[in-house]
Image (cartoon, helix red, strand yellow):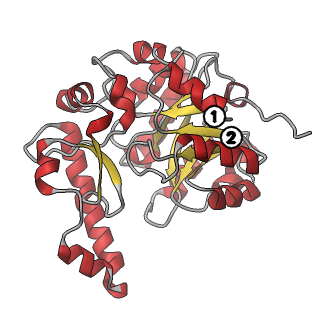
Amino acid sequence: MAARKPLLTELLDIKHPIIMAPMFLVSNVAMLKAGMEQGIAACVPALNYRTIEELRAAILELKEAKVPGGSFGINLIVNKSNLKYPAQLEAACELGVDFIITSLGSPQKVIDSAKPKGIKVFCDVVDLGYAKKVEAMGCDALVAVNNQAGGHRGDMSPEDLIKELDAQCKIPVITAGGVSNKADLERAMSYGAIGASIGSPFIASLEAPVSQEYKQACVDYGAEDIVMTQKISGTPCTVIKTPYVEKIGTEQTWLEKILNKNKKLKKWVKMIRFAKGMRDTTKAAQGATYKTVWVAGPSIEETKAIEPVAKIIQRFI
Protein backbone atom coordinates (compact mmCIF):
# COMPACT_ATOMS: atom_id res chain seq x y z
CA MET A 1 0.00 0.00 0.00
CA ALA A 2 1.37 3.43 -0.99
CA ALA A 3 2.33 5.77 1.83
CA ARG A 4 -0.10 8.61 2.50
CA LYS A 5 1.01 11.88 0.97
CA PRO A 6 1.15 14.85 3.36
CA LEU A 7 -1.57 17.46 3.01
CA LEU A 8 -0.67 21.05 2.15
CA THR A 9 -1.94 22.11 5.57
CA GLU A 10 0.59 19.69 7.12
CA LEU A 11 3.49 20.62 4.82
CA LEU A 12 3.22 24.34 5.60
CA ASP A 13 1.45 24.27 8.99
CA ILE A 14 -1.49 26.33 7.69
CA LYS A 15 -5.26 26.23 8.37
CA HIS A 16 -6.52 26.06 4.79
CA PRO A 17 -5.04 24.20 1.76
CA ILE A 18 -4.39 27.35 -0.25
CA ILE A 19 -1.32 29.19 -1.53
CA MET A 20 -1.86 32.74 -2.75
CA ALA A 21 0.08 32.32 -5.98
CA PRO A 22 3.09 34.49 -6.81
CA MET A 23 2.08 37.02 -9.47
CA PHE A 24 4.58 39.17 -11.36
CA LEU A 25 3.95 42.89 -10.65
CA VAL A 26 0.91 42.06 -8.48
CA SER A 27 1.98 40.22 -5.31
CA ASN A 28 3.24 42.39 -2.45
CA VAL A 29 3.87 42.30 1.29
CA ALA A 30 0.40 43.68 2.16
CA MET A 31 -1.31 40.86 0.23
CA LEU A 32 0.90 38.20 1.81
CA LYS A 33 0.31 39.54 5.32
CA ALA A 34 -3.45 39.54 4.78
CA GLY A 35 -3.30 35.98 3.47
CA MET A 36 -1.28 34.69 6.43
CA GLU A 37 -3.70 36.33 8.86
CA GLN A 38 -6.49 34.22 7.31
CA GLY A 39 -4.59 30.95 7.69
CA ILE A 40 -3.25 30.39 4.19
CA ALA A 41 0.20 30.36 2.62
CA ALA A 42 1.21 33.21 0.34
CA CYS A 43 4.05 33.68 -2.12
CA VAL A 44 5.73 36.60 -3.91
CA PRO A 45 8.02 36.52 -6.96
CA ALA A 46 11.56 37.54 -6.02
CA LEU A 47 11.60 39.50 -9.28
CA ASN A 48 8.96 41.87 -7.90
CA TYR A 49 11.86 43.50 -6.05
CA ARG A 50 14.37 45.43 -8.13
CA THR A 51 17.21 45.00 -5.67
CA ILE A 52 18.33 42.27 -3.28
CA GLU A 53 18.13 44.81 -0.44
CA GLU A 54 14.42 45.34 -1.18
CA LEU A 55 13.84 41.57 -1.28
CA ARG A 56 15.63 41.08 2.04
CA ALA A 57 13.58 43.87 3.63
CA ALA A 58 10.35 42.25 2.41
CA ILE A 59 11.34 38.83 3.79
CA LEU A 60 12.20 40.35 7.17
CA GLU A 61 8.88 42.23 7.27
CA LEU A 62 6.98 39.03 6.45
CA LYS A 63 8.84 37.06 9.13
CA GLU A 64 7.88 39.74 11.65
CA ALA A 65 4.23 39.58 10.54
CA LYS A 66 3.92 35.80 10.49
CA VAL A 67 1.14 34.36 12.65
CA PRO A 68 0.33 30.74 13.63
CA GLY A 69 -1.57 29.01 10.82
CA GLY A 70 -0.04 31.09 8.04
CA SER A 71 3.19 30.82 6.07
CA PHE A 72 5.03 32.66 3.29
CA GLY A 73 7.46 31.91 0.50
CA ILE A 74 9.14 33.32 -2.57
CA ASN A 75 9.04 32.29 -6.21
CA LEU A 76 12.35 31.96 -8.04
CA ILE A 77 12.93 31.92 -11.79
CA VAL A 78 15.79 29.41 -11.88
CA ASN A 79 17.13 29.74 -15.41
CA LYS A 80 19.94 31.88 -16.85
CA SER A 81 17.59 34.74 -17.79
CA ASN A 82 17.34 35.66 -14.10
CA LEU A 83 20.73 37.18 -13.31
CA LYS A 84 19.66 37.87 -9.71
CA TYR A 85 18.81 34.23 -9.00
CA PRO A 86 21.92 33.29 -6.94
CA ALA A 87 21.58 36.33 -4.67
CA GLN A 88 17.80 35.82 -4.34
CA LEU A 89 18.32 32.19 -3.30
CA GLU A 90 21.00 33.22 -0.80
CA ALA A 91 18.69 35.79 0.78
CA ALA A 92 15.82 33.30 1.07
CA CYS A 93 18.00 30.65 2.68
CA GLU A 94 19.87 33.01 4.99
CA LEU A 95 16.78 34.82 6.27
CA GLY A 96 14.56 31.72 6.31
CA VAL A 97 11.39 31.70 4.22
CA ASP A 98 8.93 28.81 4.76
CA PHE A 99 8.95 27.60 1.16
CA ILE A 100 10.26 28.33 -2.32
CA ILE A 101 8.38 27.75 -5.59
CA THR A 102 10.69 27.27 -8.56
CA SER A 103 9.82 28.09 -12.19
CA LEU A 104 11.43 27.80 -15.63
CA GLY A 105 14.57 25.74 -15.10
CA SER A 106 16.33 23.11 -12.99
CA PRO A 107 15.59 23.45 -9.26
CA GLN A 108 18.56 21.34 -8.17
CA LYS A 109 20.54 24.23 -6.68
CA VAL A 110 17.46 25.46 -4.79
CA ILE A 111 16.75 21.98 -3.40
CA ASP A 112 20.38 21.49 -2.35
CA SER A 113 20.52 24.91 -0.64
CA ALA A 114 17.04 25.19 0.88
CA LYS A 115 16.14 21.74 2.18
CA PRO A 116 19.03 21.52 4.69
CA LYS A 117 17.65 24.79 6.14
CA GLY A 118 14.19 23.23 6.59
CA ILE A 119 12.72 25.23 3.68
CA LYS A 120 10.18 23.34 1.56
CA VAL A 121 10.71 23.39 -2.22
CA PHE A 122 7.77 23.15 -4.63
CA CYS A 123 8.34 23.04 -8.39
CA ASP A 124 6.13 24.29 -11.21
CA VAL A 125 5.52 21.48 -13.71
CA VAL A 126 3.26 21.13 -16.75
CA ASP A 127 3.73 17.43 -17.55
CA LEU A 128 4.79 14.07 -16.13
CA GLY A 129 8.26 14.09 -17.71
CA TYR A 130 9.39 17.23 -15.89
CA ALA A 131 7.56 16.16 -12.71
CA LYS A 132 9.60 12.94 -12.61
CA LYS A 133 12.84 14.91 -13.02
CA VAL A 134 12.19 17.30 -10.12
CA GLU A 135 10.87 14.47 -7.94
CA ALA A 136 14.17 12.64 -8.47
CA MET A 137 16.03 15.82 -7.47
CA GLY A 138 14.25 15.81 -4.11
CA CYS A 139 11.56 18.50 -4.21
CA ASP A 140 8.72 18.34 -1.68
CA ALA A 141 5.70 18.84 -3.94
CA LEU A 142 4.66 19.51 -7.53
CA VAL A 143 2.77 22.66 -8.56
CA ALA A 144 0.71 21.30 -11.45
CA VAL A 145 0.25 24.25 -13.84
CA ASN A 146 -2.74 23.32 -16.00
CA ASN A 147 -4.47 24.86 -19.02
CA GLN A 148 -6.69 27.05 -16.82
CA ALA A 149 -3.79 28.91 -15.19
CA GLY A 150 -3.19 32.62 -15.67
CA GLY A 151 -0.02 33.91 -17.35
CA HIS A 152 2.18 31.15 -18.79
CA ARG A 153 0.11 28.00 -18.52
CA GLY A 154 0.27 24.28 -19.28
CA ASP A 155 -1.58 22.28 -21.93
CA MET A 156 -3.41 19.66 -19.83
CA SER A 157 -6.76 20.01 -18.07
CA PRO A 158 -6.76 20.22 -14.26
CA GLU A 159 -8.33 16.78 -13.95
CA ASP A 160 -5.99 15.01 -16.36
CA LEU A 161 -2.82 16.63 -15.01
CA ILE A 162 -3.63 16.12 -11.32
CA LYS A 163 -4.68 12.50 -11.77
CA GLU A 164 -1.63 11.59 -13.86
CA LEU A 165 0.87 13.23 -11.51
CA ASP A 166 -0.84 11.85 -8.40
CA ALA A 167 -0.81 8.31 -9.82
CA GLN A 168 2.74 8.37 -11.20
CA CYS A 169 4.62 10.40 -8.55
CA LYS A 170 5.26 9.68 -4.87
CA ILE A 171 5.26 13.34 -3.82
CA PRO A 172 2.07 15.42 -3.45
CA VAL A 173 0.44 17.59 -6.12
CA ILE A 174 -0.74 21.19 -5.71
CA THR A 175 -3.05 22.33 -8.50
CA ALA A 176 -2.52 25.69 -10.22
CA GLY A 177 -5.20 27.13 -12.48
CA GLY A 178 -8.98 27.27 -12.73
CA VAL A 179 -9.86 27.52 -9.03
CA SER A 180 -12.32 30.39 -8.62
CA ASN A 181 -14.41 29.20 -5.65
CA LYS A 182 -14.76 26.50 -2.96
CA ALA A 183 -16.42 24.03 -5.34
CA ASP A 184 -13.49 24.29 -7.77
CA LEU A 185 -11.03 23.69 -4.92
CA GLU A 186 -12.94 20.66 -3.64
CA ARG A 187 -13.14 19.26 -7.18
CA ALA A 188 -9.38 19.58 -7.65
CA MET A 189 -8.77 17.86 -4.33
CA SER A 190 -11.14 15.04 -5.31
CA TYR A 191 -8.80 14.38 -8.27
CA GLY A 192 -5.87 13.97 -5.87
CA ALA A 193 -4.52 17.49 -5.27
CA ILE A 194 -3.51 18.37 -1.70
CA GLY A 195 -4.41 22.03 -2.21
CA ALA A 196 -4.34 24.85 -4.73
CA SER A 197 -2.16 27.74 -5.79
CA ILE A 198 -4.64 30.53 -6.57
CA GLY A 199 -3.65 33.80 -8.22
CA SER A 200 -5.99 35.74 -10.52
CA PRO A 201 -8.88 36.16 -8.01
CA PHE A 202 -6.50 38.18 -5.81
CA ILE A 203 -5.67 40.77 -8.50
CA ALA A 204 -8.89 42.61 -7.65
CA SER A 205 -7.97 42.93 -3.97
CA LEU A 206 -7.78 46.20 -2.08
CA GLU A 207 -4.21 45.33 -1.06
CA ALA A 208 -2.93 44.69 -4.61
CA PRO A 209 -0.60 47.46 -5.86
CA VAL A 210 -1.92 47.47 -9.44
CA SER A 211 -4.12 50.15 -11.00
CA GLN A 212 -7.82 50.49 -10.25
CA GLU A 213 -8.50 49.90 -13.97
CA TYR A 214 -6.71 46.53 -13.89
CA LYS A 215 -8.70 45.47 -10.82
CA GLN A 216 -11.98 46.63 -12.38
CA ALA A 217 -11.19 44.69 -15.56
CA CYS A 218 -11.03 41.50 -13.45
CA VAL A 219 -14.54 42.36 -12.21
CA ASP A 220 -15.99 43.36 -15.58
CA TYR A 221 -14.55 40.49 -17.64
CA GLY A 222 -14.94 36.73 -17.09
CA ALA A 223 -13.53 33.34 -18.07
CA GLU A 224 -14.78 33.66 -21.66
CA ASP A 225 -12.78 36.88 -22.06
CA ILE A 226 -9.40 35.24 -21.42
CA VAL A 227 -7.28 34.65 -24.55
CA MET A 228 -3.79 33.40 -25.32
CA THR A 229 -1.29 35.85 -26.78
CA GLN A 230 2.29 35.59 -28.00
CA LYS A 231 2.66 39.38 -27.99
CA ILE A 232 4.13 39.67 -24.48
CA SER A 233 7.06 37.30 -24.11
CA GLY A 234 7.02 35.34 -27.34
CA THR A 235 5.66 32.44 -25.26
CA PRO A 236 1.88 31.92 -25.07
CA CYS A 237 0.43 33.88 -22.15
CA THR A 238 -3.17 34.44 -21.01
CA VAL A 239 -4.54 38.00 -20.99
CA ILE A 240 -7.91 39.74 -20.79
CA LYS A 241 -9.40 40.34 -24.24
CA THR A 242 -9.62 44.13 -24.08
CA PRO A 243 -10.41 46.20 -27.21
CA TYR A 244 -6.67 46.85 -27.60
CA VAL A 245 -5.82 43.13 -27.46
CA GLU A 246 -8.52 42.50 -30.07
CA LYS A 247 -7.06 45.23 -32.26
CA ILE A 248 -3.44 44.05 -32.21
CA GLY A 249 -4.31 40.34 -32.35
CA THR A 250 -2.71 37.53 -30.40
CA GLU A 251 -0.39 35.98 -32.99
CA GLN A 252 3.21 36.88 -33.80
CA THR A 253 3.72 39.07 -36.86
CA TRP A 254 4.99 37.49 -40.09
CA LEU A 255 8.39 39.07 -39.43
CA GLU A 256 8.60 37.66 -35.89
CA LYS A 257 7.68 34.19 -37.20
CA ILE A 258 10.46 34.34 -39.82
CA LEU A 259 13.03 35.61 -37.30
CA ASN A 260 12.02 32.95 -34.78
CA LYS A 261 12.82 30.25 -37.33
CA ASN A 262 16.37 31.56 -37.72
CA LYS A 263 18.55 29.65 -35.23
CA LYS A 264 21.11 32.45 -34.94
CA LEU A 265 18.55 35.22 -34.39
CA LYS A 266 15.86 33.34 -32.44
CA LYS A 267 17.40 33.92 -28.98
CA TRP A 268 17.85 37.65 -29.55
CA VAL A 269 14.36 38.11 -30.97
CA LYS A 270 12.88 36.36 -27.95
CA MET A 271 14.93 38.49 -25.54
CA ILE A 272 13.82 41.72 -27.25
CA ARG A 273 10.17 40.57 -27.32
CA PHE A 274 10.36 39.58 -23.64
CA ALA A 275 11.90 42.92 -22.62
CA LYS A 276 9.31 44.92 -24.56
CA GLY A 277 6.49 42.73 -23.26
CA MET A 278 7.58 43.19 -19.66
CA ARG A 279 7.73 46.99 -20.12
CA ASP A 280 4.23 47.02 -21.61
CA THR A 281 2.86 44.76 -18.88
CA THR A 282 4.42 46.91 -16.16
CA LYS A 283 2.85 50.06 -17.63
CA ALA A 284 -0.53 48.33 -17.87
CA ALA A 285 -0.37 47.15 -14.25
CA GLN A 286 0.44 50.62 -12.99
CA GLY A 287 -1.99 52.68 -15.07
CA ALA A 288 -4.44 52.34 -17.93
CA THR A 289 -3.52 53.50 -21.41
CA TYR A 290 -5.03 52.78 -24.80
CA LYS A 291 -2.31 50.11 -25.13
CA THR A 292 -3.37 48.11 -22.09
CA VAL A 293 -2.55 44.42 -21.76
CA TRP A 294 -3.67 42.83 -18.50
CA VAL A 295 -2.51 39.33 -17.56
CA ALA A 296 -5.15 37.14 -15.87
CA GLY A 297 -6.62 33.63 -15.92
CA PRO A 298 -10.16 32.20 -16.23
CA SER A 299 -10.52 32.09 -12.43
CA ILE A 300 -11.54 35.78 -12.48
CA GLU A 301 -15.00 34.37 -13.34
CA GLU A 302 -16.21 34.65 -9.73
CA THR A 303 -14.69 38.10 -9.16
CA LYS A 304 -17.71 40.40 -8.72
CA ALA A 305 -16.18 43.30 -6.78
CA ILE A 306 -12.87 44.76 -5.61
CA GLU A 307 -12.57 43.35 -2.08
CA PRO A 308 -10.06 42.84 0.76
CA VAL A 309 -7.89 39.72 0.56
CA ALA A 310 -9.65 38.40 3.67
CA LYS A 311 -13.04 38.47 1.94
CA ILE A 312 -11.69 36.88 -1.25
CA ILE A 313 -10.32 33.97 0.81
CA GLN A 314 -13.81 33.31 2.19
CA ARG A 315 -14.81 32.42 -1.38
CA PHE A 316 -12.63 29.31 -1.09
CA ILE A 317 -13.19 28.17 2.50
| Image: 194 above or below 254 | above
Q: Which mark is residue 98?
A: 1
- Residue in the image at 31% along x and 64% along y: 234
Q: Which residue is mark 2?
A: 120
Q: Please state, as top left, top right, bottom left or bottom right, where the C terminus lies in the image.
A: top right
Label 2 with label 1: CB-CB less than 8 Å:
yes
* Residue at the extreme right of the image, as rendered: 1
Residue 264: x, y in percent? 35, 87
Structural crowding at the residue carrying mark 1, measured as other residues with C-alpha within 10 Å and reported as few (<14), some (14–19) or many (≥20): many
- Residue in the image at 44% along x and 60% along y: 82
Q: Please state, as top left, top right, bottom left or bottom right, where the N terminus lies in the image.
A: top right
| Image: 25 above or below 111 | above
- Residue in the image at 37% along x and 44% along y: 24
Residue 279: x, y in percent? 22, 53
N-terminal of the pair, mark 2 or mark 1, is: 1
Structural crowding at the residue carrying mark 2, measured as other residues with C-alpha within 10 Å and reported as few (<14), some (14–19) or many (≥20): many
Left or right of 50: which side holds 253? left
Left or right of 274: which side holds 153? right
Name the amino acid type tagged 1: Asp
Which residue occupies the foreground of this view, 41 or 249?
Answer: 249
